[in-house]
Every structure is written in structure tokens, then in C-alpha cells.
Image: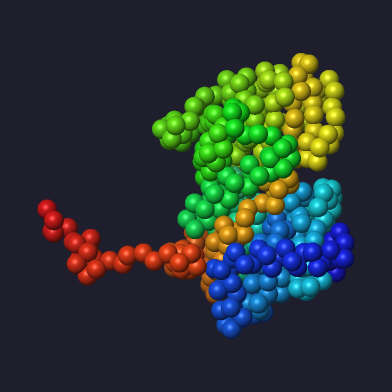
Amino acid sequence: MSDIKNKDLRDAGKKRIEWADRDMPVLQEVRERFTKEQPLAGKTVAACLHVTAETANLMRTLKAGGAKVTLCASNPLSTQDDVAAALSEEYGIETFAIKGEDRDTFFKHINAVLDTKPNLTMDDGADLVTTVHTTRTELIAGMVGGTEETATGVIRLRAMAKDGALKFPVVAVNDAKTKNLFDNRYGTGQSTLDGIIRATDMLIAGKTFVVAGYGWCGKGLAMRGKGMGANVIVTEIDAVKALEAAMDGFRVMTMDEAAKVGDLFCTVTGNVNVIGRKHFPTMKDGAVVCNAGHFDVEIDVKALIEMATSKRENIRSFVNEYTVNGKRIFVLADGRLVNLAAAEGHPASVMDMSFATQALACEWMAKNPGITANVYDVSDEIEHMVATTKLASMNITIDTLSDEQKKYLDSWQEGT
Ligand SMILES: NC(=O)c1ccc[n+]([C@@H]2O[C@H](COP(=O)([O-])OP(=O)(O)OC[C@H]3O[C@@H](n4cnc5c(N)ncnc54)[C@H](O)[C@@H]3O)[C@@H](O)[C@H]2O)c1
């Protein structure tokens, strides 16, 4: 039995899911084929993802492919309660997710989906895989494999594989080009600014915007911030990425320096305490601080709470004010993923590619039982299918290699 906020929200959720589906042509095509071919028949899939309209369409696709599917939230703040209601009441997919659920409920929900004894896990941050490997080890024997949606989860899984601790195979969906080049870059870039603007209603133009981390997400965020007129500063720990940011036209400096001049800060590193105790006292009055990285550990909110001489909660939805050294610092969404907490996450059009890749990776895993426990890349065939279907949906046709060009590219004797 699902655990959701309010069943009566089902109609609103259904409308939202259908609206998102219009913009998910690749996933629709996968769903049509899955309906005919039933590649997941007899499989039980436990999914732990942001419970959004786009995720709902992925769950519908897995179910259409013959799987028994259950879903819980990968983040306590990102659940769309109407979508959870529609999934449970309209589409018959057991869902365990309530926006704002506390830590105990969050883990209770993770265990509820694991109680279905899944063969396949689908994670966004490796919570299911971690739980199976720590407190639910009795499930390992029945596991065929899993898929992982985000960079932070993939880092954990690779660390587990390196230590020989990973007991079943997992596909790193995050590392697919059809995922991170688009979802991380354009999705996070747009939706993070959307979350910041919805939470604060601030004008981005003319602000000094500090982006911590110049990976795929950071690149998108810096690019979109610049496009809206911000004066963007990038902080990095990787020399090559820092150089790339500098040559892309951004100022690059340490967080110690950036903390003094930023009006708006956003962390997207997958790391811990990137903005910490030493930075808050040096910030300007009115600085706005938020995070779009996976876990709520990138900003040391605990330290800020300890240091603050006063605190005002919820001065707007998702905005808390802390006073340090007589200056106000505003933290958005408690330092959790601001694009999912204060906005609606990535637009459907970009999740189309990520989630088509997820569905196809899940099919690949179901068709390859018994492979060695390791972290696997998404195959070139899947990447090709997703990219070509997306292009076709955008009415874009590209050139194909002529025989002469193929021969030229295959040969080392020609053209010298
Ligand atoms: N908000 C979302 O919807 C969303 C979407 C996709 C990914 N993510 C998350 O965002 C984070 C970043 O993802 P990505 O794909 O850009 O990863 P990535 O690995 O491509 O980039 C992370 C960057 O942060 C840098 N970094 C690490 N520690 C740092 C520090 N202390 N200071 C400055 N820079 C530092 C790394 O050098 C790297 O360049 C991850 O936690 C990922 O799970 C969030």
C-alpha cells in the first residue's frame, strides 16, 4: 500500500504527468516497444528517484515493459505530491513519498520499496544499492543489477567496486553522453536558476554569481547565469576545469576570495563543505546561498546555524535568514537541491533522454543476468538510439558518411 500525502491530488498529478509526456518523445517510443515486447516481464524494479512528472513517465514505461514497479523518493524535498497520488491511484504504481518527509520516513520508504524483493534497482544517489549492501543484505542473492542516475551515486558505486564491496552490477546512466551533456548541463543550468528565482524573485542581471564546481552542471549554470546578465565567478579544485572556466570567459578564484564578493552562491560539486564556517563571516550582507549538488552537505548549514546570532525561518517559502557578524545570509531550501525543492526539477524535454537511457539500461541489465558485479557504461547502441530518436523528434536530419568518406576515415594511406 502506497504512502503518499493525499489521494485526492490524483487528477492534478495526472494532468502534470501527461503535460510532461508531450515533451518526452524518446521515452514514448521506448514505451511503445516495451508494451509489445515485454522485456521486463517477471522482473521487480525498485526505484528511488525524484518523484516528479518525468519520473512518473519512466515508471509507466517500466510497467508497460512488464515489470512490477515501486517508487520512493531520492530526496525528502523533491516529491510532487500530486504526481505521487496519480502514480498510486491512476497508474497502479505503489509509491512511497511525501514532500518534506522526515529522515525516519525517508528511510522507512526506502525499505518499503526494498520489501518487494526487487531484481533491479534504479537509484539517484545510490541509496537503494547502499541499503541493500548494508542493512538488507538478504536481498543481494535475488538481484540482477541496478542503474544509477547521478554523478554522486556513480562516484560511490565506483568506490564500492574498487574495494570489491559491490555485489551486483550497476549501469552508470549518469555517465552516458545522452545524459550528462544535456541533463546535467542544460537541465541543471536552467532549473537551478528557476529555483533561485522562484524562491527569491531576485534579478540575476548585474549580480555577482559564484558557481562552485565547473563540471557538467556547473558549466550549464555558469553559462545560463551569464546569459541572464550575471557577473559569474567559478571556483574549482581541478586545474583543467579551472582553465576551461577561465577560457570560457569566467573569473576563477578560490572560495575564500569569492565569498567576499558574491551576491549569489550555488554549489554543484558533489563534495562536502565547499562553503563552510570560514566563509560565512566574510560574506556581504544579503548574500544568497544555495546548492544544486546531490546531497545537502555542500554548504555547512550546521556551522551557519551555530554561528548565527539570529535566525528567521521561512521568511519566504524555501528561504531562511541567518545573521552572522551583523550581516544577513539567506539559505535556500536548507541547502538541498534548490532546483527540485523550489522549482520543478529539469524540464521534461531533457529528462526524456536521461529516462529513455534509464529504461534501456534497465532492459539491458534484465537481458544480461549473471554479469560480473561492476559499474558498466551505457552501450553505444543505446546512446545512438536515444540521440537519433531525439533528433528525429526535433525534425533535424544530419549528413551520413559517403563510401568515399568511410574509406578515407578507415585508411591511414590516403590523404598523406
Ligand atoms: N540538481 C540536479 O538536478 C542535479 C542534476 C545532475 C547532477 N547533480 C549533482 O550535481 C553534482 C555535480 O554533478 P556534475 O555532473 O557537474 O559532476 P562533475 O563531476 O562533472 O563536476 C563536479 C565538479 O566539481 C569540482 N569540485 C569538487 N570539489 C570541489 C570544491 N571543493 N570546490 C570547487 N569545485 C569542486 C570537480 O573538480 C568537478 O569539476 C553532483 O552531486 C551530482 O549528483 C544534480
- Total label count? 0
- Say which quarter of the image contains residue 330: top right
333, 159: nearer the viewer: 333
> Is residue 282 shown left or right of residue 27?
right
> Is residue 403 shown left or right of residue 129?
left
Q: Split into 4 quadrants, where in the image is the N terminus?
A: bottom right
In the image, is residue 244 above or below residue 277?
Answer: below
In the image, is residue 140 above or below residue 335?
Answer: below
> Residue 342 location, x and y as percent?
73, 45
Residue 17, visible in the rendered structure: yes
Tell which residue pokes out farthest to the top in this image. Answer: 325
> Residue 315 location, x and y as percent?
83, 34
Q: Quadrant of ligand 1?
A: top right
In the image, is residue 375 above or below residue 248?
Answer: below
> Residue 197 location, x and y as percent?
68, 40
Which residue is at 84% across, 63% downward?
A: 9
Which residue is at 80% across, 61% downward?
A: 82
> Residue 29 location, x and y as percent?
55, 74
In the image, is residue 405 above or below residue 230?
Answer: below
Residue 165, visible in the rendered structure: no
- Say which quarter of the image contains residue 123: bottom right
Which residue is at 70% across, 61% downward?
A: 53
